[in-house]
């Protein structure tokens, strides 16, 4: 393929003379050229070939012509547009031209200066605001305000690329652009509404973006940053705006207030126009339209205002007042140890974890774990943590307070010494110490923190209740702490063992029950997940009030009740938007309990895991983010995400997950032929099976998932349970592709292997529209004996659905009545659910849609997650599809 510059140069030679490349962006390459007709220098932007290949070019060109009508002193006009047909390329490439602006972009200036003077910021913002208000009044929204699109020339700011983002959005298929790894817009400057893909955007989305740019001009970085675009978008949606004056204390409060208002999550809470935002930014008491029309007077007013502000700020500096930090946030750093523990038990880390958890379960305080935020040397020896570094970390997190201290060991006792520090004033405001028996360092830390709590609470505020941890049996607390540390290191099996032992020591230790339920849930319905969540519910009176919705949401999640879980977890996050565990559990609901698709649900799950991963010491969220990156099909993103997880998780604790991720990456990079599915030992079959399940629902070609499923299914040494799981996955991949002959062979092979119920999948596949009706009919009429007490609930259900499809009401009723009779005798819990589903089919046959909907809702009850994942009928997919179709037919 020829060089793109030379190919474009030749393709446009009749109109433009291209001289050189100016730069490359996410969507286009920019060239300096000369317009032959008018003899003027221009910038020619040519869309990237991969983007041009997934767009409707005519629609794109029509859309940008709308923007070409804009004529304003602070808008770079669009001069021309068209299609280039470069030789050697398979598609034409849309392009558009603008005047070449002598000067620099705001991005270039920020790279050089990082932070700009306040008067320059206001000047630039005012020019941009005038351009925005002009365009908004004509129904044109920019959608991509960022430093790269603000050009500085002749003492003025000009806005480039007006309307291009909308043109791209209208012309490009969303699924295609996602698979190409591109985003329309720039994550660091996108409003929450634009990031969510909302259609009804107005000018207030540009005001939000302008506020992000203003924040960066003053603070040196945008308000929200992160390791990936997904992380940044989640922070836009969920995080409060970081205090600007923490980064730049001389900024006036009025400036920060204006920026905060422009960055409100809800558009209705922002300024109505960009001009009003800049007026507030500049401290003007009147609307933007009331200011003097001449630039000279504006500059004089701005300079006079700046002088007054400088005087006021000098007085504030002399007075010693600090910028505001959150009074409810406390960073807890690991404690130093005297003498240091040669056994490596990290007692100071364990005590900090105990103190932090006590604060987490205290209202209204919020605990921030300081351990992952300090350098490696200080993690190894917390005694090396300096006051300067501790204060920097606290201020960066927006916390007013931080706790540090030491653990002093003696022959038969241990003393914990705590210091409560004010991050704003750089001073120790309270000290406390407590001495306990040598094995009770964590309890000593709890006693010490109760002594400093009054200093953390406002006058008249209710004293924190630490009964959730106070006066517990030391052995139970020690086991819980060990389980907590194992959980955060991704070693869920060990964590569950420690936490269950803690509960055996003290059955009312609710924090152990909560964490145990989560660890068991991670182990795919491991032992006791529902029992542990029920125990946590039982102990709700011992927990702070804000824990109630989270515990209810967790209980619903481990029981497979997706709707209830989302409701309760949403309530928990309304009260505490930064709650790591609530975000993590809600992500689990989207990821495991709702249909597996690459699309909206993956995006919702990813947003929750990204929010949880903001706790930089929390590895579980990083694991799911790595899985999602692989599912996306973006190899570079997947490698980064896997590395981020492996960097955080302990090698011994994450061996299985490490194997899964490496297997998936290998197939992603080298294809199924280069994967190592068949080379894996039998004891790694579970990791192969899990990798296959994830790949089956990914954007990657199905060959990887099929190869992995076949490797497990066809291995004669595979245990029967794993073979069943591989069979379910393999037949699903074949059915989805309509490969009926191979599907028949696989089901016949499974039956021959000893999986005698494998042929029941013929019925489910036929109901889904796969061409195996003859086989399905044979299964129902010849293989299913309704009088056999061993017949399974899902077999009766499948038979009833088959009869309903054929219009055989009597057959459906017979299957329903058999299930109902078994349910009345206290049979399998699925009997009642499947009987209700068949009742709904009978109601539908009578034309009673309302009754059908009501009955189906009752049928979708709680399901054990393990059965949901490996069973045939637990998901009740045909019934859920029927429910969705009926709702759509009603316009619901």
Image: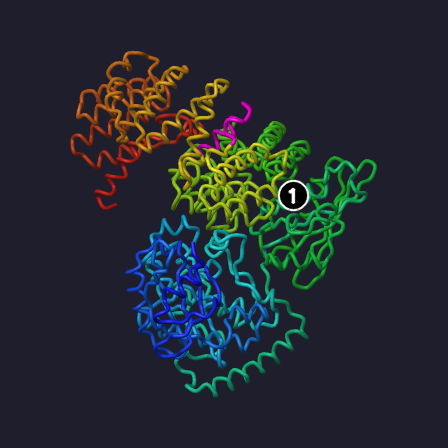
Q: Position of residue 668 (x, y in %)?
A: 48, 39
In the rendered view, does 341 fall on the left or right side of 277?
right
Q: Nearer the viewer, residue 544 or 366?
A: 366
Q: Quarter of the image containing the N terminus?
A: bottom left
Q: Quadrant of residue 883?
A: top left
Check residue 678 for magenta coloring.
yes
> Which residue carries the number 1 mark?
353
Q: Position of residue 308 (x, y in %)?
A: 58, 82
Mark 1 element type = helix
Eyeballing the image, is 262 above or below 554?
below
* Residue at (65% x, 43% y) in the render: 353
In the rendered view, does 354 fall on the left or right side of 201?
right
Q: Quadrant of residue 868?
A: top left
Q: Nearer the viewer, residue 222 or 636?
A: 636
Residue interval drawn in magenta = 676-693
Q: How is the image coloured?
A: rainbow
* Residue 505 appears anywhere in the view: yes
Q: Quadrant of residue 85?
A: bottom left
Eyeballing the image, is 218 above or below 777?
below
The kind of secondary structure the magenta stretch mainly shows is: helix
Q: Position of residue 358 (x, y in %)?
A: 62, 44
Q: Quarter of the image containing the C terminus?
A: top left
Q: Nearer the viewer, residue 90 or 120?
A: 90
* Residue 527 appears anywhere in the view: no
Q: Position of residue 90 (x, y in %)?
A: 35, 53
Q: Nearer the viewer, residue 131 or 383?
A: 131
Residue found farthest to the right: 411
* Residue at (30% x, 27% y) in the render: 740
């Amino acid at each position: 393929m020829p060089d793109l510059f030379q190919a474009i140069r030749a393709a446009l030679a009749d109109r433009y003379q291209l001289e050189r490349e100016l730069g490359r962006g996410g969507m286009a390459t920019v060239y300096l050229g000369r317009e032959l007709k008018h003899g003027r220098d221009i910038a020619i932007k040519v869309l990237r070939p991969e983007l041009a290949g997934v767009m409707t070019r005519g629609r794109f060109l029509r859309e940008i012509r709308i923007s070409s009508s804009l004529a304003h002193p602070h808008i770079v006009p669009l001069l021309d547009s068209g299609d280039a047909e470069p030789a050697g390329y398979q598609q034409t490439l849309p392009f558009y031209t603008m005047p070449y602006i002598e000067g620099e972009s705001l991005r270039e200036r920020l790279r050089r200066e990082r932070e700009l003077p306040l008067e320059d910021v206001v000047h630039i913002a005012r020019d941009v605001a005038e351009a925005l208000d002009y365009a908004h009044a004509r129904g044109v929204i920019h959608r991509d305000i960022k430093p790269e699109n603000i050009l500085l020339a002749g003492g003025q700011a000009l806005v480039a690329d007006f309307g291009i983002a909308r043109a791209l959005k209208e012309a490009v298929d969303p699924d295609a652009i996602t698979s190409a790894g591109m985003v329309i817009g720039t994550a660091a400057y996108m409003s929450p509404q634009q990031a969510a893909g909302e259609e009804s955007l107005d000018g207030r989305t540009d005001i939000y973006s302008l506020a992000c740019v203003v924040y960066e001009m003053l603070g040196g970085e945008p308000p929200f940053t992160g390791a990936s675009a997904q992380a940044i978008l989640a922070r836009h949606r969920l995080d409060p705006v970081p205090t600007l004056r923490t980064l730049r204390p001389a900024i006036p409060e009025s400036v920060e207030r204006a920026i905060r208002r422009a960055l409100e999550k809800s558009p209705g809470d922002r300024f109505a126009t960009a001009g009003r935002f800049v007026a507030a930014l500049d401290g003007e008491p009147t609307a933007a339209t009331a200011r003097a029309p001449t630039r000279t007077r504006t500059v004089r007013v701005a300079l006079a205002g700046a002088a007054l502000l400088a005087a006021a700020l000098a007085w504030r500096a002399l007075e010693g007042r600090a910028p505001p930090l959150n009074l409810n946030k406390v960073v807890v750093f690991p404690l130093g140890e005297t003498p240091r523990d040669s056994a490596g038990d990290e007692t100071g880390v364990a005590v900090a974890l105990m103190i932090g958890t006590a604060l987490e379960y205290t209202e209204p305080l919020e605990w921030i774990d300081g351990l992952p935020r300090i350098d490696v040397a200080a993690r190894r020896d917390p005694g090396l943590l300096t006051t300067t570094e501790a204060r920097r970390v606290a201020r960066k997190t927006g916390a007013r307070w931080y706790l540090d201290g030491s653990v002093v060991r003696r022959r038969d006792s241990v003393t914990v010494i705590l210091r409560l520090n004010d991050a704003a004033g750089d001073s120790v405001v309270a000290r406390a110490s407590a001495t306990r028996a040598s094995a009770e360092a964590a309890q000593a830390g709890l006693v010490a923190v109760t002594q400093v709590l009054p200093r953390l609470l406002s006058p008249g505020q209710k004293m924190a209740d630490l009964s959730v941890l106070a006066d517990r049996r030391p052995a139970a607390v020690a086991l819980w702490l060990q389980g907590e540390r194992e959980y955060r290191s991704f070693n869920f099996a060990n964590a569950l063992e420690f936490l269950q032992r803690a509960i055996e020591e003290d059955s009312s230790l609710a924090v152990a029950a909560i964490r145990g339920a989560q660890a068991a849930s991670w182990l795919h319905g491991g032992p006791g997940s529902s029992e542990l969540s029920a125990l946590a519910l039982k102990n709700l009176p011992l927990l702070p009030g804000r824990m109630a919705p989270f515990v209810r949401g967790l209980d619903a999640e481990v029981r497979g009740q997706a709707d209830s879980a989302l409701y309760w977890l949403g309530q928990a996050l309304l009260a505490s938007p930064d709650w790591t565990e609530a975000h993590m559990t809600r992500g689990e609901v989207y990821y495991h309990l709702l249909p597996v698709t690459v699309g909206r649900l993956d995006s919702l799950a990813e947003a929750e895991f990204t929010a949880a991963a903001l706790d930089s010491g929390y590895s579980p969220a990083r694991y799911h983010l790595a899985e999602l990156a692989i599912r996306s099909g973006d190899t570079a993103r997947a490698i980064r995400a896997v590395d981020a997880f492996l960097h955080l998780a302990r090698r011994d604790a994450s061996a299985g997950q490490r194997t899964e991720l490496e297997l998936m990456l290998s197939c992603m990079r080298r294809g199924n032929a280069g994967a190592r599915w068949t080379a894996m030992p039998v004891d790694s079959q579970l990791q192969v099976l899990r990798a296959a399940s994830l790949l089956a629902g990914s954007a990657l070609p199905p060959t990887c998932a099929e190869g992995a499923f076949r490797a497990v299914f066809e291995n004669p040494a595979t245990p029967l349970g794993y073979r069943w799981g591989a069979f379910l996955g393999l037949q699903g991949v074949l059915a989805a592709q309509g490969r009926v002959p191979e599907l028949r062979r696989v089901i016949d092979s499974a039956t021959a292997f000893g999986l005698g119920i494998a042929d029941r999948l013929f019925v489910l596949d036929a109901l889904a529209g796969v061409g195996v009706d003859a086989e399905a009919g044979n299964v129902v009429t010849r293989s299913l004996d309704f009088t056999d007490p061993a017949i399974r609930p899902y077999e009766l259900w499948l038979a009833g659905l088959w009869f309903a499809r054929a219009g055989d009401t009597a057959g459906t009723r017979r299957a329903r009545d058999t299930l109902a009779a078994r349910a009345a005798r206290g049979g399998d819990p699925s009997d009642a659910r499947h009987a209700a589903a068949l009742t709904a089919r009978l109601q539908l046959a009578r034309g009673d849609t309302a009754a059908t909907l009501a009955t189906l809702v009752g049928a979708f009850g709680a399901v054990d997650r393990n059965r949901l994942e490996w069973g045939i009928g637990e998901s009740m997919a045909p019934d859920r599809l029927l429910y969705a179709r009926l709702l759509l037919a009603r316009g619901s």
